[in-house]
Amino acid sequence: MRLFHVIRAQQFDRELLGRIFSEAREMEELARKGGSNILAGKVMATVFYEPSTRTRLSFESAMMRLGGRVISTENAREFSSAAKGETLEDTIRIVDGYADVIVLRHYESGAAERAARVSNVPIINAGDGPGQHPTQALLDLYTIEKELGHIDGISVAMVGDLANGRTVRSLCYLLAKYKDVKIYFVAPDVVRMKEDIKEYLTRHRVPFYEEEDLKEVASKVDVIYQTRIQKERFGDRIEDYERARGVYIVDRELLDVMQPHAIVMHPLPRVDEISPEVDEDPRAAYFRQAQNGLYIRMALLKMVLT
Ligand code: CP
């Protein structure tokens, strides 16, 4: 069956994940050879109500490398007719007449689902507030498989702002599809992982542990998935933000206790939660991870448009 909307990580099964990763491997090859024209004549709209570097630019680069064209509103809150009071639904009804696929980033959880309900063309969720970021989770899983050679049997530490981090939420849903995966949540008290994800993991028999000692956890996991404390989601709760920031930092000392094969990932952007000295270590996988976003998004665009 053709892939259409990409809204939630739960919509993927292992067979489909395998197909996406296989396409992404082909896209790596294609990108190295200078791209192709398989999406010539197709138009992608990127409609972003929140800031982005990686997601928007990698989608746009992906479309161009496959011969398609791009229309974009990168600050839709101010520069689209949302500023005049237009609803998201009306905007989508209009843009779907101009584009063959819409990549949407929005500040409200559930926005991509609302858009999909009124759109005649595929909607790709590029992050909906604190909800989900399914294409990030796909590139995260692709990175894990590429770096470690397998996903079954891995132990992952998710660190930092787990309450507001949409990438960790989507990644939990995807990891639950693999065998013998263990998850360690290491978060300051004010930003612990939410109950809905913990209930989902329990229902799907994925063991998870809430821990405080990052050093102890780092010594036994295959992946440290660090995340930024998302200041923009705290509103006027400045004290909570101050209590959460700087508590868990990946630095040289932490690298020293990690296993030689283990990797450090981060969806980026980072602020100060990974020290720059870590960048030089071969286990720092976060820049390779961001590069993989291009190949996963090329694969997704090919799959929804052909
Ligand atoms: N990881 C991620 O979504 O980055 P951007 O916010 O820069 O798109």
Image (spheres, grey):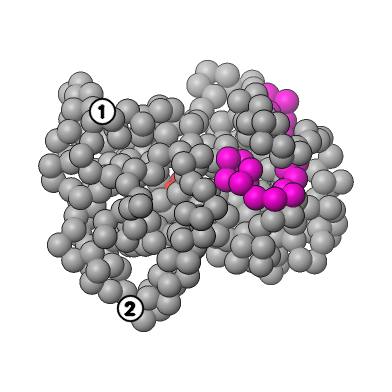
172 on left or right of 61 = right
Please name the residue that numbered disc 1 is placed on. Answer: 88
Q: Is residue 170 above or below residue 198?
A: below
Q: Nearer the viewer, residue 136 or 73?
A: 136
Please tell me the numbered disc located at residue 273: none
Kindly indicate the quadrant of the structure image that contains residue 185. top right
Ligand 1 within 8 Å of disc 2? The answer is no
**Residue found at x 51% / y 55%:** 15
- Residue 206 appears in the rendering: yes
* Residue 246 lies in the magenta-colored region: no
Q: Looking at the image, is 147 positioned above or below residue 86?
A: below
**What residue do we see at 85% from left, 57% from top?**
257
Kindly indicate the quadrant of the structure image that contains residue 113: top left
**Secondary structure of the residue carrying numbered label 2:** loop
Q: Which residues are the magenta region?
A: 171-192
Disc 1 secondary structure class: helix
Instruction: Mark 1 and mark 2 in contact? Answer it, CB < 8 Å.
Output: no
Residue 34 — which label? 2
Quarter-of-image position of residue 91: top left
Q: Earlier in the sequence, mark 1 or mark 2?
A: 2
Q: In screen coordinates, is 264 left or right of 299? A: right
Q: Position of residue 127 (x, y in %)?
A: 43, 39
Q: Distance from label 1 to label 2 (Cα)?
A: 36 Å
Q: Position of residue 130 (x, y in %)?
A: 50, 31
Q: Is residue 26 above or below residue 289?
A: below
Residue at image position (48%, 37%) is 132
The answer to whether residue 51 of the structure is visible from this angle is no
- Measured along the vertical axis of the image, is residue 193 above or below residue 273? above
User: In the image, is 208 to the left or to the right of 245?
Assistant: right
Q: Please name the amino acid that badge 2 sits on.
A: Gly
Q: Quadrant of the C terminus?
A: bottom left
Q: Farthest top residue?
A: 236
